[in-house]
Amino acid sequence: MKHKVLILFFTASIQLFAQPGIRYELNSINFIGNNYFSSSTLHGLIYSRPSPWWFWKFLHSFSSLGKEPVYFDSTNIQIDLTALKEYYNSNGFFDAKFGYRYTVDTADKKINLYYTIDESKPSYFGKLNLFGISRLPKYLYNNIYKDIALDTNQRFSQEVVQNNTNKFINYMNNNGYIYIRLDSTVILKDTVNYKADVNIYFSLGNLYKIDTVLVTKTGAGANFVEDGLLRDISGIKKGQLYSQDALSQSQLRLYQTGLFNSVMLRPKENDTTDNKVPIEMIANIGLLNEMDPEIILNNQQNAFNAGLGVSYIRKNFLGDARKLTISTSFGVQNIFQVDFGKLIKAFSIYDTTLNGYVDSRIILNQPYLFEKPIFATWETYATINKQLYYYNTLLGTKFTFDFEMPVYTFINHLSASYTVEQSKEDYRTLPDSLAIKLVSDIAADAASTTADNILFPTRGYNLSFHIEEGNSFPQKNSSSAGFYKVQLGGSYYLTLDKHQSSIAAFKLKVGNIQVYYGSFAGVPINRTFFAGGSTSIRGWESNQLVPPASPRLRTIPGITNINIEGGSFLLEGSMEFRRKFWENVGYALFTDFGNTWLGYNTFSWNSVAVAVGFGLRYYTPVAPFRVDFGFKFYDPASHEFLWQKKEHVFQNVVINFGLGEAF
């Protein structure tokens, strides 16, 4: 009887799908028996796709937007089963079995497809054996083996094997073994004890040291830059072990000079003698004098700024690859909210129509300072920053030292700076309220990053640490305050699907300013904390979240109810779901929280602002352009939630524009 049922089913299937002109939509694809892997993961593996949502089909019916219906094709089933079997096999389920069935709705002409999975018991890692490396020095073998050793309590994974193999090859490439090659990988499956031994076979090759650096120059500026200077900046020394990572860092160091249209470092493998390999530097050097107009788009001061600028650049200024830059620029804050008609008729430094900045500066860059991998910058600047209640004129000079860090260290960015700056603060509603503050500032920044992509990070993290001390050097200044400033920040990215189109992102930032002489009112405005805006808490305008006015702040007649000084304690956090639904288009759902306070001891949970919202993203090759709609979910000023407010919900929305992701 069992055979008769199968024959009848098979015959019915042929009759059903052999009828000309009748097509059945693939309504859904379901998985049964998948305990170890989610259905969303398995959906990403198979070739078949269910028919899209009715709205997308409706759009497609009269436009190029949307998506067309997907019809059932039985020939895809075997492709799907093969993909499922390969995935399970590569993850240690060597005995997994697969089947399928489907149900037919002849009235609506739809089919629901079901894949049945018997996962069986998984196998775990057994022994790891490496072959062909007997000539490897013992210290190298011990250093790398502890990083690639397999955890016998971990389920077998082909991805882990591949990653560890690549890690071993990269380590060898960075320790002189330029020609190491992978021959084969053999997995010995023990289906009785559910173990998988891994045997990896290599061809090691010889140990190589660097011979010399051969420079080939082209381009308009080739005759004005000496070969020896380029060798010095690269930092490559004759006799050092060949290292691919060292070559990459040297290439990056050369690019930082700004001399090159293109530069490439590579081993000249055909000229190796006596286990020495020459390095070929192929450099195209551009014009040494440039005048560059620019369109400015940035996210300074938690707001989207758009503006124009122009800069003159002199490369190799007085030799040693120095670069001189003279620039001026301006930016308009929240440009989409500016009333340009009113602005043109009555422009004044005291008006409240326009927020933004004007900036002029002279910058001198010196790469490879003291013949060390230190990138030094000296800049002198004048900046006018206009905000709603004040404008701030900054006159200063700054020395910055960026230290090149090895790629294998936890801290991969480290810099130190010294700034002398005069800050003139004029409150725009009161022309006679000028305050002048001087700051002598020493600061250090450290960062660690493993994020895999700058434009659309899908995994990894970014960590940052900033410490700053103001006005203890060279001497105390009677008109200003002495203070310490510390800020910590971190973001984490998690991929939610195989195609890396759905991402969960998290951010946390905390900062504190401690005054050790004078008062907080003596700390320059541009050193204090503000919250709110396109890269902060998106339910509030830029820099709108500050502590309430307090006797601890300067009392100014006419605006005593407004704090324009900012806060001394900051807490910010965000949770965001990002998804690309087309190659260059995506959306985001977010929750932001945080605020600023006058000291960490005034912090309270009922004063934490909370915003929720959604946004759209368009991903360009340069950076994503985004628009976010933020709603005040909880407003600490009124202690009201979104549903308690008397205003319509859309009266509580803030539209934020930005370049790049919010974090």
Image: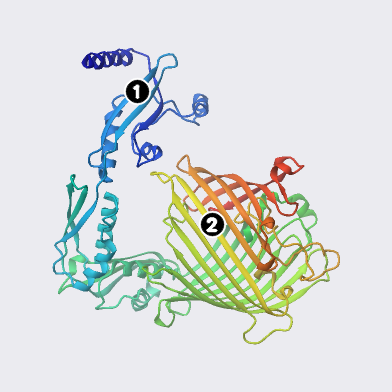
Residue 366, relative to residue 11: is it above or below?
below
> In this rendering, is residue 40 above or below 256?
above
Q: Using the rendered image of the protein, determine whether residue 354 is visible from the camera's viewpoint.
A: yes
Residue annotated with mark 2? 507
Mark seen at residue 535: none
Q: How many other residues sit within 10 Å of disc 2, few (<14), some (14-19) or many (≥20)? A: many
- Could you give the CA–CA distance between mark 1 and mark 2, rounded to whole angstroms? 44 Å
Give coordinates of residue 133: x percent, y percent.
Answer: 16, 65
> Which mark is drawn over residue 102?
1
Q: Position of residue 353 (x, y in %)?
A: 76, 55
Q: Quadrant of the N terminus?
A: top left
Secondary structure of the residue carrying numbered label 1: strand
Question: Residue 627, relative to residue 83: is it above or below?
Answer: below
Q: Is residue 528 left or right of residue 84?
A: right
Q: Residue at x 23, y 42 (%)?
A: 94
Whether residues under marks 1 and 2 lie with C-beta atoms below 8 angstroms apart, the answer is no
Residue 13 placement, left or right of 255 = left
Q: Residue at x 50, y 26 (%)?
A: 54
Image position of 569 (left or right of 46) = right
Helix, strand or loop under label 2:
strand
| Farthest-out residue, front | 193
Measured from the top left, where is residue 32 in percent x and y? 35, 32
Q: Name the residue furthest bottom.
A: 475
Q: Is residue 299 visible?
A: no
Q: Is 118 drawn above or below residue 131 in the view shown?
A: above
The kind of residue on which mark 1 rests is Tyr
Task: Indicate which disc, 1 or 2, sits on the residue closer to the N terminus.
Answer: 1
- Other-residue count near label 1 (Cα within 10 Å), few / some / many at <14 / 14–19 / ≥20: few
Task: Identify residue type, mark 2.
Answer: Lys
- The residue nearer to you, when weighing 332 against 174, is 174
Of discs 1 and 2, which sits in the foreground?
1
